[in-house]
Amino acid sequence: MDGDLVIDVHGLTKSFGDTRVVDDFSIQVPRGAIYGFLGPNGSGKTTTIRLMCGLLKPDGGGGTALGYDIVTQSREIKSRVGYMTQKFSLYGDLTVKENLDFMARLHAVPNQKETVLATLEEYDLEPRAKQLAANLSGGWKQRLALAAATMHKPGLLMLDEPTAGVDPKARRDFWDRIRRLSQQGVTVLVSTHYMDEAVQCDSIAYIAYGKKLIDAPSADIAGIVGLTTWRIEGKGLQPVYDALEHARGVDQIARFGSALHVSGRDEAALERAIAPWRERPEFEVSKAKTGLEEAFIWLMTGAQDNFQ
Ligand SMILES: Nc1ncnc2c1ncn2[C@@H]1O[C@H](COP(=O)(O)OP(=O)(O)OP(=O)(O)O)[C@@H](O)[C@H]1O
């Protein structure tokens, strides 16, 4: 492997028919990283992840995953990758244990019987071992899917919107497990639409229209985008919204629950736009930390300007 890079790809492109879905995509992912892939629906996240893991051949570009060539050694990569999608892809008419038995055979896992038992224990699935997978709740289905995806000890785990439709407690539990796997040296690529999951990723690639708009540690993204944000709270915010929407210095305005988040790149101009509202006693106006969501909306706005 090149240094400790688990993914090292350059210039990947992929079209379906006349539509270019992935456009000149490059990325380096170090071992043990949790790398989040974010972007609007249909922006090419799944296709990009599948290209990087040798599940799909690129039209152009190339590179390595786990040290193997993604174009010519896809078989080697596939056997070393754990793959989990939002759609439950195990067998509903098999029990929990039968599903794991099946996956263990499929991956030719050594010591199959012991491995399945250890996996049931590790994922707290023992009490449900004889239950049909179809009858599990969403959170337990997802836990079984993760158990199945990791049983062959993959070095790279690829999770495509793994927690879509799963309740918050099950999602938290899922992320605790992901963090533990990463501490054991497993590299995780995860696509998600949830901001609370995005912040748990070490780094984030934000993709829109097949292009990577940003690729940085999640903690650095707001700073790179360079927005300053003010929060305005109070009743009757619509007139505030209407007044600020096109005000000089305001690049972006968004509702967050019962508050408005008003952001701009020119700090002084933004402050001037906000000033009249700070004097109004019915509103509470305070400086806020620019969040990932604001940063992504900003990136998308710029991207639309560039791509339309
Ligand atoms: N096998 C395929 N054949 C034709 N078009 C495809 C194929 N796979 C994906 N696409 C199209 O490519 C585009 C990107 O799809 P992709 O699934 O990679 O996006 P995504 O960012 O993962 O979306 P989502 O967030 O909705 O899962 C979409 O327009 C999709 O319809």
Image (tube, grey):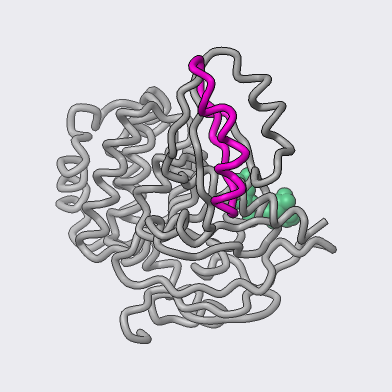
Rendered location of residue 222, percent (x, y): 47, 54
Range of residues picked out in magenta: 255-282
Classify residue 218 as left or right of residue 256. left
Q: Residue farthest to the bottom?
A: 2
Can residue 81 be spotted in the picture? Answer: yes
The quarter of the image holding the N terminus is: bottom left
Q: Is residue 71 magenta?
A: no
Q: Quadrant of the C terminus?
A: bottom right
| Residue 19 figure quarter | bottom right
Q: 298 or 180, which is in the foreground? A: 298
Q: Position of residue 8 (x, y in %)?
A: 46, 78
Q: Using residue 295 as the reference point, say whether residue 12 is left or right of it.
A: right
Image location of residue 190, percent across then percent down? 44, 53
Q: Residue at x 56, y 34 (%)?
A: 275
User: Can residue 257 be seen by looking at this rendering?
Assistant: no
- Which residue is pictured at 32% across the width and 38% down the height? 143
Q: Looking at the image, how many numbered discs can be counted on the residues?
A: 0
In front of the other: 308 or 79: 308
As drawn, is 114 to the left or to the right of 192?
Answer: left
Relative to 70, does residue 51 appear above or below in the rendering? above
* Residue 295 percent location from the top left of the image: 54, 50
Is 214 situated above or below 238? below
Residue located 22% across and 48% down the image: 116
| Residue drawn at 49 percent across, 82 percent down | 69
